[in-house]
Image (spheres, grey):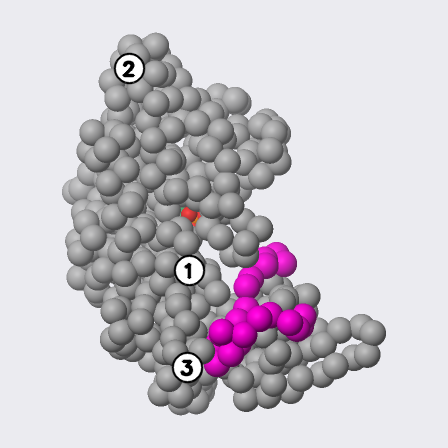
Amino acid sequence: MKQSECLGVNEQGHLTIGGCDTVELAKEYGTPLYVLDESGVRAACTSYRQSIERFYQGKGMVCYASKAFCCKEICRIMDSEQMGLDVVSEGELYTALQAGFPPERICFHGNNKTDHELRYALESNIGLFIVDNVYELERLNSFAHEMGKKAAISFRIKPGVDAHTHEFIRTGQIDSKFGVALETGEAMQIVKEALKLENVILKGVHCHIGSQIFELEPFELAAQRMIEFMAQVKEETGYTIEQLDLGGGFGICYTEKDAALRYDSYMEKVSVVVKESCERLHFPQPFMMLEPGRSIVGSSGITLYTAGAIKEIPDIRTYAAIDGGMTDNPRYALYQSEYEAIVANKADQPKTMVVTLAGKCCESGDLLGENMPIQPVTSGDIVAVLSTGAYNYSMASNYNRLCRPAVVMVKDGACRVIVKRESLQDLVRNDL
Ligand SMILES: *Cc1c(COP(=O)(O)O)cnc(C)c1O
């Protein structure tokens, strides 16, 4: 799903998303405003789901990594799309349960789950715990014992594949706060430990090798190593691990420099490696799980702002300030992520200007991008920043006591608020 598939330009020269005029949306709901196209989100779910049906004979499940964008309506949409749901905290689990998401399709991740979180998830009868370490394994087993339950578990494994270095550096992966390593024997050890425990049932192994990845080779190599490990477990213990979860991390287009792959090409390629490895090692083909986050919601979201002060510093740069910033999108401040910007009320005009898009927070680093080509922007214009559906609302803060924006869902020309704008009362709600 490319950004452009939900965006358009209407007769007034205004940017549209999901058939709605963004200038009208800004007028009706105010700015800053997150806008999410429902059809785009659903199409991404369908694409992943169908890839498992087509290339892996339907033996698998796609779990949406809810940290990318978590609110009740997104959980409801994921439920209606027959997706599973990854959560990494009590808060994400609570949101999913409040939305009526079926607990049996919830997977609980995280490298440091608290006692309280483990008990809460056990009480809620979630489907799977992705156990990170021995400390968690032992506590989960004893809490499950206290409650008279058996917890289905999977292990977070470091397969020794580092997608971001373009080389598969071993030490790079061992040095991660997540999971247990293959190379050191730690993974085999924890598996053997789990097989001795009464109140956990080992279902699967899991790996997640990074995010915003555009190459398929690291996924293929990870799949191969994981199958080899599963076969080795069978050989050493006689136990067959049934599920293989290959995580998320599929890249999306933020600017035209990014060349995103079709989401179904992931399963197409990886299933070949899985099938071949299983045949070679005489191991049964596992139930396959995928966990896309960014690629489910990222391209279908935009943020609308109102341009304020435009500050031209001769021979240096032009700052265009907007009425949001790192509070609603911290990704540029965190890791210089690049975005594309459009003047929504001049979307039919060429991008003849270059600006640094600045937020309104008291930080020099509060920028949404530097040297961004854009239509000639003046104070009062509506500025749209594209592909903000993932890791924007979910990473938003109240720094400088700014209120978090509302989220509006659009579909086929209709719009509805799915998250209300925070109010000043919300800001002082917990102050004593
Ligand atoms: C973050 C995360 C994902 C989703 O990653 P994306 O890059 O958003 O697709 C999936 N699985 C795990 C364990 C994660 O931590």
Residue 144 in sight: no
Label 3 is placed on what type of residue? Gln
Above or below: residue 236 compared with residue 73: above
Mark 1 crowd level (few <14, some 14–19, many ≥20, 10 Å Cα): few
In the image, is the residue at mark 2 within 8 Å of ligand 1 by its beta carbon?
A: no
Tell us which disc is closer to us: 1 or 3. Answer: 3
Above or below: residue 162 compared with residue 63: above
Q: Are marks 1 and 3 in contact (CB under 8 Å)?
A: no
Residue occupying the point 53% across, 23% down: 184
Residue 398 percent location from the top left of the image: 50, 77
The residue at which mark 2 appears reads as 283
In reply to whether residue 344 is colored magenta, the answer given is yes
SS at badge 2:
loop
Residue 183 percent location from the top left of the image: 52, 22
Residue occupying the point 63% across, 67% down: 373
Sequence-wise first label, 1 or 3: 1
Mark 3 crowd level (few <14, some 14–19, many ≥20, 10 Å Cα): few
Residue occupying the point 58% across, 28% down: 168
In the image, is the residue at mark 1 within 8 Å of ligand 1 by its beta carbon?
A: no
The residue at which mark 3 appears reads as 12
Sequence-wise first label, 2 or 1: 1
- Give me the disc on residue 302: none
Q: Which residues are magenta?
A: 334-355
The residue at which mark 1 appears reads as 4
Marks 3 and 2, how far apart at CA: 60 Å
Residue 217 percent location from the top left of the image: 49, 29
Q: Quadrant of residue 128?
A: top left
Residue 149 in sight: yes
Sequence-wise first label, 3 or 2: 3
Q: Quadrant of the C terminus?
A: bottom left
